[in-house]
Image (cartoon, rainbow, N blue to C red):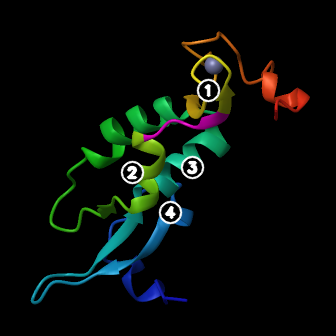
């Protein structure tokens, strides 16, 4: 664990998001900055405040990532995990009898070809030939 106490007095924090701190960053001759994981910030907003991913994303962009509070403004890290859920909505796998192939369909959407939904997929009844 990193001892954050040495920074606390002089380093700015984002109130209520300690769990999203993943480390600190240093640049020569500059004061160290706390580094927050963007995906963890969104996770906290989602779990603590009951937001959807979209709401959390919007809130975090507007209120956190866009806030400049001086030279020691915390740094926000966008990692691979963030891209994963940002770019790709959750998918469910569907074997489509119309297209005769397995395809990925976004959660909550139905198959464009046969109209199957995740809850009502033919595959549930063993469609192997
Ligand atoms: Zn289908």
Lower position in the chain sequence, tag 1 or tag 2: 2
Cβ–Cβ below 8 Å for labels 4 and 3?
yes
The residue tagged with tag 3: helix, strand or loop?
helix
Q: Specify start and end residues of the magenta stretch as a single range.
A: 88-93
Q: Residue at x 50, y 63 (%)?
A: 20
Cβ–Cβ below 8 Å for labels 1 and 3?
no
Q: Which residue is mark 4?
A: 20
Separation of residues labelled 2 and 3 (CA atoms) = 14 Å
Which residue is most to the right?
125
**Side of 127 where 87 appears, left or right:** left
Expressed as whole percent of the image width and height from the top left, the position of residue 101 reads 59, 32
Question: Which circle, 4 or 1, is nearer the viewer?
Answer: 1
Separation of residues labelled 1 and 3 (CA atoms) = 37 Å
Question: Which circle, 4 or 3, is nearer the viewer?
Answer: 3
Q: Which residue is mark 2?
A: 83
Q: Nearer the viewer, residue 121 or 11?
A: 121
Q: Nearer the viewer, residue 121 or 126?
A: 126
Cβ–Cβ below 8 Å for labels 2 and 4?
no
Which residue is most to the top?
115
Label 1 crowding class (10 Å Cα cut-off): few <14, some 14-19, many 20+? Answer: few
Question: Which circle, 2 or 3, is nearer the viewer?
Answer: 2
């Amino acid at each position: 664990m990193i001892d954050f106490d040495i920074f606390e007095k002089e380093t700015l924090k984002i109130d209520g998001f300690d769990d999203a701190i993943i480390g600190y960053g240093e640049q020569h001759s500059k004061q160290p900055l706390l580094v927050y994981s963007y995906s963890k910030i969104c996770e906290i907003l989602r779990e603590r405040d009951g937001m959807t991913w979209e709401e959390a994303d919007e809130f975090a962009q507007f209120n956190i990532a866009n806030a400049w509070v001086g030279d020691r403004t915390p740094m926000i890290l966008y990692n691979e995990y963030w891209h994963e859920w940002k770019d790709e909505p959750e998918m469910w796998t569907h074997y489509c009898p119309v297209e005769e192939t397995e395809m990925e369909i976004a959660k909550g959407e139905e198959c464009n070809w046969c109209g199957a939904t995740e809850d009502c997929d033919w595959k549930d009844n063993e469609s192997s030939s």
